[in-house]
């Protein structure tokens, strides 16, 4: 399997600021930000809009990229769920190598599909590089298992940004967007970060950078420079046209917010005392370890 040169993978729970961060990184001279690559098949099938506002099949960037990708194989860009995926997640939490995990495909066929998915994602990265000519691809697909498999494939060329936002803000945002209860959202938030911590035991510190959304909002330039140093890329702003898929509808509908950042703290007046008590019970200790008191 051939791979593209270098990848920045933003691994975060939903509503944690990954679209904002990806959009900022995508304005650096060496970076192509693609958004949530795992959703490409849905975008293609529904001809959904790229960030540039054109439907994906009419967008020049994606049009050129998709000419280099096997459209039939796009069906495999979606992460798998169910028993096979749960088994793969468990295997990924181990220190087994990619070849060992891959060898289990003969026992659990769903593994083979997940490896096909990783191969397809790598092909999309390569195609993006050939279209835009930039050395670094940024993907914000939010999948810890994919992150682990991509690390096995890319090694030192994969840099992971672990983006965290105050869990209270996240569950409030999830409730507003989806109607989910605070308890259910807090449980999912806590589980995501617990699994992520387990997975990171097998990925060296030098490949991971912890960033808080609030710090990004407080000091975007300082935070971007820190990421550039970590990922060994130049901090050089460029007038890149952004063509990414997925992500926050707020940013997608208000393009200026990529460059006009403000910290969203609606949770402070929208969560009731009962909501806060429930969050604290479910996810308070973990939130505390991230520095949210
Ligand atoms: Zn576009």
Image (cartoon, grey):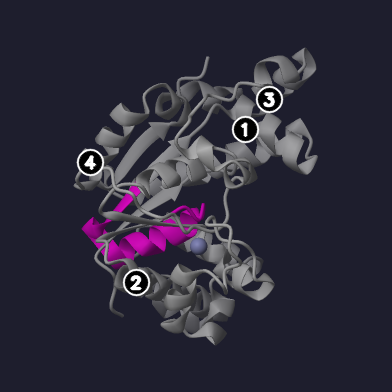
Q: Secondary structure at mark 1?
A: helix
N-terminal-most mark, 3 or 1: 1
Q: From mark 2 to mark 3, how far is it between C-alphas? A: 45 Å
N-terminal-most mark, 4 or 1: 1
Magenta span of residues: 139-160
**Is residue 286 shown above or below 46?**
above
Q: From mark 4 to mark 3, how far is it between C-alphas? A: 38 Å
Q: Name the residue nearer the viewer: 293 or 15.
A: 15
N-terminal-most mark, 2 or 3: 2
Residue wearing tag 2: 131
**Is residue 222 shown above or below 100?**
above
Within 8 Å: ligand 1 and the Cβ of disc 1?
no
Within 8 Å: ligand 1 and the Cβ of disc 3?
no
Nearest-to-viewer mark from 2 and 3: 2
Q: Secondary structure at mark 4?
A: loop
* Residue 127 within the magenta-colored segment of the rendering: no
Tell me, yes or no, if residue 14 can be seen here: yes
Q: Residue at x 65, y 42 (%)?
A: 188
Residue wearing tag 4: 235
Residue wearing tag 3: 279
Residue wearing tag 1: 170
Q: Residue at x 66, y 66 (%)?
A: 82
In the rendered image, residue 191, in percent from the top left (x then y), is placed at: 59, 42
N-terminal-most mark, 4 or 3: 4
Whether pointer 3 and pointer 1 mark residues with C-beta atoms closer than 8 Å, the reply is no
Q: Secondary structure at mark 2?
A: helix
């Amino acid at each position: 399997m051939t791979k593209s040169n270098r990848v920045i993978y933003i691994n975060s729970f939903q509503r944690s600021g990954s679209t904002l961060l990806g959009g900022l990184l995508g304005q650096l001279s060496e970076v192509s930000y693609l958004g949530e690559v795992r959703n490409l098949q849905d975008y293609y099938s529904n001809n959904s809009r790229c960030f540039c506002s054109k439907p994906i099949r009419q967008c020049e960037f994606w049009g050129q990229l998709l000419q280099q990708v096997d459209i039939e194989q796009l069906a495999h860009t979606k992460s798998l769920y169910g028993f096979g995926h749960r088994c793969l997640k468990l295997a990924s939490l181990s220190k087994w190598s990619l070849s060992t995990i891959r060898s289990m495909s003969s026992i659990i066929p769903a593994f083979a599909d997940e490896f096909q998915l990783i191969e397809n994602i790598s092909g999309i990265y390569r195609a993006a590089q050939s279209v835009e000519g930039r050395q670094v691809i940024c993907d914000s697909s939010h999948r810890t298992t994919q992150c682990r498999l991509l690390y096995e494939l890319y090694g030192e060329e994969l840099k992971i940004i672990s983006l965290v936002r105050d869990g209270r803000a996240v569950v409030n945002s999830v409730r507003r967007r989806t109607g989910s209860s605070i308890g259910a959202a807090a449980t999912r938030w806590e589980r995501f970060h617990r699994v992520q911590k387990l997975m990171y035991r097998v990925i060296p510190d030098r490949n991971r950078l912890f960033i808080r959304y609030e710090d990004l909002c407080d000091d975007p330039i300082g935070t971007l420079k820190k990421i550039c140093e970590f990922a060994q890329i130049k901090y050089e702003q460029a007038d890149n046209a952004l063509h990414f898929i997925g992500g926050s509808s707020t940013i997608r509908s208000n393009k200026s917010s990529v460059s006009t950042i403000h910290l969203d703290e609606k949770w402070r007046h929208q969560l009731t005392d009962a909501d806060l008590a429930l969050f604290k019970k479910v996810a308070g200790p973990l939130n505390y370890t991230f520095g949210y008191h």
